[in-house]
Image (cartoon, helix red, strand yellow):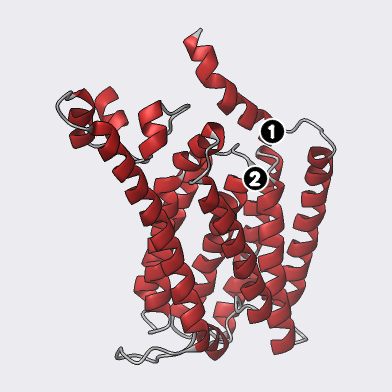
Amino acid sequence: MERIHHLNPFAKRDSHTKTTVVTCMSQYPLVSYILTSPSIGWLRLLERHSWDHKILTTVTWLLSIIVSVYYTFHQPHDGVWARRKIWKQNDAFHTAFRMNHIIASIYWIVLFILQGGYIAHLFSTNVERLNSACSVGSHFILNNLFHFAFVMLFVRSYFGWAELFIILNFINLSSLYFRHPGYARFIHWPVVSGPLAWTFVAIYWNGAIMVPNSESLVARIFGNIFIWSILAYGLFFVIVYKDYTMGFNLSVLSAAIGVAQFFRQVIAFQWIFAFIIMAILFIATVVVAVPAATGGNSKFARARESDTERAPLLGE
């Protein structure tokens, strides 16, 4: 079991050895052989694997950006179903989870910029920052690939398959969150909470389009009910983990839903519910964020401190 844990690229590690910090992806049998063989220039090979991982992380991130930007302004030219731009697809279905494309686009622009800062830390000479960045690298690569697949399917109206990839990414990001809840903000916000909040809301966003008669009264009633899960989900992280980033992310996405629903139909419950959820989550975010900004101790901060101190304690 210990060997399996060592080989698993998604396994949580309290600290990385020199070799794992250098490579971030040295969880393969071949590398174990290389490290124990004096006849092989393993340092050169480790350096090559290090750059392979950095390149893979950067390429998948750029792939995620390129496909998102391209299909924001262009529609696909292949496929058997309706082919639309991302936000044209959003506007074509007046569901209970239709979003305002301006707010949602700003959310993604900021998220991509923050992710660029995370990738920069993979090239850092600071071992602690590099160690933290490496710990979530495999999940981040998988997130980028799932997002790429989702966009490619969504714009071609393969909503069922798109929903599958959203759910798979939700499982991937949830696993990442609960195993690494307390890393520094430069990792947690762009790699963990930002994509996770979007993925949770996107399950309803794409799912509402996927179901038959998505604009019917029955579908909207279910939308009026399910939208409250955004509040429950956000408060869970704010209260249990003192994670104001999740509260803020979900409040922004709730605002995107509220604005779109308001301009669709003023006399309706959905936009009212969305703005109530946004307000509650934002207030909860401020209540948690202000003490954290002023040096107050939070469970989120204590979790990070615990992760940081665990390795020396084990050494004792």
Residue 167 in sight in this render: no
Q: Residue at x 63, y 60 (%)?
A: 230
Give the camera-side residue of 235 and 179.
179
Quarter where residue 87 is shown: bottom right
Q: Residue at x 68, y 81 (%)?
A: 260
Q: Does label 2 or label 1 sit earlier along the sequence?
A: 2
Q: Residue at x 78, y 57 (%)?
A: 282
Percent across and percent down for residue 161 are: 34, 72
SS of the residue under disc 2: helix
> Which amino acid type is marked by label 2?
Arg
Q: Residue at x 54, y 73 (%)?
A: 205
Quarter where residue 300 is shown: top right
Percent across and percent down for residue 26 are: 30, 37
Percent across and percent down for residue 175 are: 45, 44
Residue 118 in sight in this render: yes
Query: Pointer 1: residues within 10 angstroms few (<14), some, or many (20+)?
Result: many
Residue 301: image tag? 1
Residue bearing the label numbered 2 = 185
Position of 240 compared to 61: left or right? right
Q: Is residue 67 above or below residue 62?
A: below
> Which amino acid type is marked by label 1?
Ala
Q: CA distance from mark 2 to mark 1?
A: 10 Å
